[in-house]
């Protein structure tokens, strides 16, 4: 249970603990076996974070008031923004970017799952996927033609 509380606390106060610059490009995903699984926005950030592991561990353990985290496991992925304050440009939440029909499908597919934690994790995952689908659909445009009249796509 303490692990879950620490995980939640890190997620809620991530930028304050780790610093705004790093906090905007990373997300503390989970804690397993005294390792923090940290998501980096890109491979560039992942590489930079490898050099900062000791400093990050020190800041995290200082915030936890104990040496509960002994390692940081880095991976590239989507950085969550739901627990972080919106930036000046007004980050949209993934659920805001989902087409209503996809959101309805997501909710319908989850209604029979009894375990609340599993249902919420699946909801977040499916809503992220639906947001990507919605974004791709909104970005699709007519194929661009070259001077010869042939399609460039």
Image: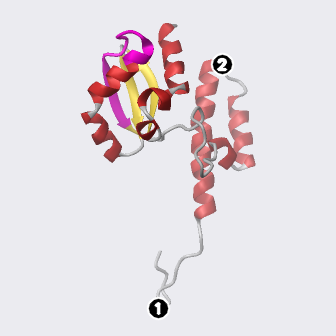
Q: Position of residue 62 (x, y in %)?
A: 39, 16
Q: Secondary structure at mark 1?
A: loop
Residue placed furthest toward the bottom: 148
Q: Position of residue 86 (x, y in %)?
A: 60, 42
Q: Quadrant of residue 34?
A: top left
The dot on residue 116 is 2
Q: How is the image coloured?
A: secondary structure
**Residue at position x 40%, y 30% from top?**
38
Q: Which residues are magenta?
A: 61-75
Q: Quadrant of residue 65?
A: top left
* Vertical relation: 124 (above or below) 32: below
Left or right, 24 with reference to 131: left
**Residue at position x 70%, y 50% from top?**
99
The dot on residue 131 is none
Q: Out of 113 and 38, give the one closest to the viewer.
A: 38
Residue at image mark 1: 147
Q: Out of 19 and 114, give the one closest to the viewer.
A: 19
């Amino acid at each position: 249970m303490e692990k879950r509380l620490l995980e939640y606390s890190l997620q809620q106060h991530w930028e304050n603990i780790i610093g705004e610059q790093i906090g905007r490009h990373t997300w503390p995903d989970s804690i397993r076996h005294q390792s923090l699984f940290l998501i980096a926005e890109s491979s560039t950030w992942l590489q930079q974070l490898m050099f900062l592991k000791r400093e990050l561990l020190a800041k995290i353990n200082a915030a936890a008031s104990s040496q509960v985290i002994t390692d940081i496991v880095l991976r590239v992925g989507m950085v969550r923004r739901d627990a972080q304050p919106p930036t000046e440009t007004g980050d949209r939440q993934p659920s805001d970017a989902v087409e209503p029909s996809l959101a309805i499908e997501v909710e319908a597919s989850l209604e029979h799952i009894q375990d609340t934690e599993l249902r919420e994790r699946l909801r977040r995952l499916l809503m992220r996927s639906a947001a990507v689908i919605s974004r791709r659909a909104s970005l699709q445009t007519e194929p661009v033609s070259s001077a010869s009249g042939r399609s460039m796509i």
